[in-house]
Amino acid sequence: MNSPTEHSGRSYAEVYRESVDRPEGFWLTAAEAVEWETPPTRALDDSAAPMYRWFPGAVLNTCFNALDRHVRDGHGDRAALIYDSAMIPAASRTYTYAQLLDEVSRFAGVLTSQGVAVGDRVIIYMPMIPEAAIAMLACARIGAVHSVVFGGFAAKELATRIDDACPVVLVTASGGLEPGRTVEYLPMVEKAMELSDTPPHTVIVKDREQIPGSAADYQGSTSAWFDWDALIADASPVQPVPVAATDPLYILYTSGTTGKPKGVIRDNGGHAVALTWSMHNIYDIGPGDVWWTASDVGWVVGHSYIVYGPLLAGATSVLYEGKPVGTPDAGAFWRVLSDHRVSALFTAPTAIRAIRKADPDAQEITKYDISSLKALFAAGERLDPDTYAWATKVLDRPVVDHWWQTETGWAICANLRGLEPLPLKAGSPTVPVPGYRVEVLDGHGDAVPAGTEGSIVIALPLPPGTLTGIWHDPERYVTSYLAAFAGYYLTGDSGYVDEDGYVFVLGRSDDVINVAGHRLSTGSIEAVVAGHAAVAECAVVGIRDELKGQRPSGYVVLKAGVDIDPETLRSDLVSMVRDQIGPVATFRDVTVVAALPKTRSGKILRKTMRQIVDHEEYTVPSTIEDVAVLEALKKQLRG
Ligand code: COA
Ligand code: AMP
């Protein structure tokens, strides 16, 4: 018998049509692949539209579906998680489903004994070690809501997230390992707790012997600090707690156009159904396949496809601590593929560009047996045709771009390898995934003809697994996503659909930028730069970068009478951004300019500035305040 996620023998077009014409039946059938405490009788609850909920009345536990059911069904000895550390190879280890279930249920016991209950928030600020996934699954097991904060963010960003999520417990590690340096987390955690108005009452620290600092060093501060290993040694395992399908599983903060990050809320039921469906239909991965997402658990890609998706599908997931290059060389990815007989790899185009830069002829690949690899999936930023062509040539396998966002949690557009592989086109993530009604609109909300660029929107309701709101800020959900075009979700990306229905995503149409697959807000960097004593005003724009896709570039107007050496200013601003946002902002360029071009209402013309720097064609907006400012800037920036 086929699994409910299989659409045996049916075409993409047929399945897509069914998903949009008969969504109730479509998603209720997909939901049969998940095990429920109370199965759903309805798919969509539109009673509070435009706020939609999926599988009202149904009850399940996500962790049970990711772990217990596979063990119960006799697959306890199958590998669940392969921790491969290029930083400390000796630490690498494999967890079977039975072992992972044991660790997770005992850490769930730890959290319970620390007073964490259903609906409580737990912040997880960890490097790429298995305990990060264990902590996430343990939260899911007891119905607590995790919020993972990427390790490349500094104390202030962590504090902002603490204040918004109001966690009762923070789980961390003594630190992370970056090539050539260690990143000590505990001083940052302590600083974040000091900056925060709502510090958690408990901090749990996974001690890594390579990195100084432990829970014992921080006793006596506002919270109680505990050692992970000591707590887990005494912990009793706990059983999964059934929760409503509509209850939150996690909050993941992402950059919006303002400095304040948005807490994207993901539910339990829609998420489990959508990810289970996606593993089979998009990625063609099933029980026992080895799947590797080379990303970080701090990003949505890591949530969906390092942790939840592969485990829900009963597959083996590789959790890799290392980089594509320099750990130790450009063969790192090929080594992992070969060591673990990986069936499919998912990474960001930046990683491929980094490998290409270090090893243009892909000499390293010849040293490894990567015959197990069926396909390479890319997302997180646009897969430029040049990188696509190179990867296709050196791998001699399908290189599959797919487009999605933190908000959606899974792909909006993809080439569905498990359903019906379609011809690949360079520069396109192919076609809308079943459930997503993608359209391209002009500024008036009218659909544009094929081939014409516009705002990419998705007709409401969004499918299961997508965001159900913004934490503590329902109004912001409406203003950020639903207010621009009635009846549609605004993706913030612009692009077009070609004659064959292929979607081409060209870039953000707002002030969000994508640096090495990391999503950042130029507004938050501007807020830091504006805090320098010499700066009167500033603009940060995302300019083209050969390796990282984009990088932030700062344009600064000095206060009258200030005389500061440009290199001193640059180095001040670079350290301020590093300290307040984190190294991941990759802020290095600072240019002092006489004035910033603005509209008559005072809005800085960031897009025009970016077009000037990137040597693109641009039209001078009719609302410009002083065209001479733009001319002077052009002269300075283009020479
Ligand atoms: N903790 C602390 N610092 C971190 C960090 C982490 N988890 N991740 C990155 N950083 C630091 C880096 O060490 C670097 O610091 P530096 O300025 O002192 O050199 C800085 O942040 C910038 O990092 P990054 O832009 O990632 O560059 P990199 O040289 O470290 O790595 C790539 C380049 C291509 C390997 C890396 O960007 C990559 O793998 N990108 C893919 C991103 C991704 O997975 N996105 C998710 C969507 S799939
Ligand atoms: P994030 O929320 O960090 O996943 O970033 C989402 C943003 O990354 C999207 O809105 C796009 O701008 C960009 N993005 C992600 N995947 C792709 C892709 N395949 N093609 C083009 N842009 C992408």
Image (spheres, grey):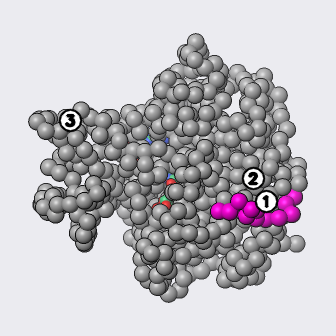
Q: Is residue 440 visible?
A: yes
> Split into 4 quadrants, where in the image is the N terminus?
bottom right
Asked if labels 1 and 3 touch by Cβ distance under 8 angstroms, the answer is: no
Left or right of 474 on screen, residue 604: left
Instruction: Examine the structure image and report whether residue 47 is included in the region drawn in magenta.
Output: yes
What x and y, as percent, mark residue 451?
A: 44, 83
Q: CA distance from mark 3 to mark 1?
A: 55 Å
Name which residue type carries label 2. Thr
Asked if labels 2 and 1 touch by Cβ distance under 8 angstroms, the answer is: yes
Residue at the spot x=77%, y=68% of the render? 27
Q: Which residue is mark 3?
A: 534
Q: Is residue 66 visible?
A: no
Left or right of 241 on screen, residue 265: left
For label 1, the SS is loop
Which labelled disc corresponds to residue 246? Answer: 2
Left or right of 371 on screen, residue 355: left
Q: Which residue is mark 1?
A: 55
Name which residue type carries label 1. Phe
For label 2, the SS is loop
What x and y, as percent, mark residue 369?
A: 57, 60
For label 3, the SS is loop
Q: CA distance from mark 1 to mark 2?
A: 7 Å
Report the predominant secondary structure element of the magenta stretch: loop
Q: Which residue occupies the extreme front position in the image?
A: 601
Q: Earlier in the sequence, mark 3 or mark 1?
A: 1
Instruction: Examine the structure image and report whether residue 224 is included in the region drawn in magenta.
Output: no
Vertically, is 173 above or below 389? above
Which labelled disc corresponds to residue 487? Answer: none
Name which residue type carries label 3. Ala
Q: Which residues are magenta?
A: 39-50
What x and y, as percent, mark residue 589?
A: 26, 47
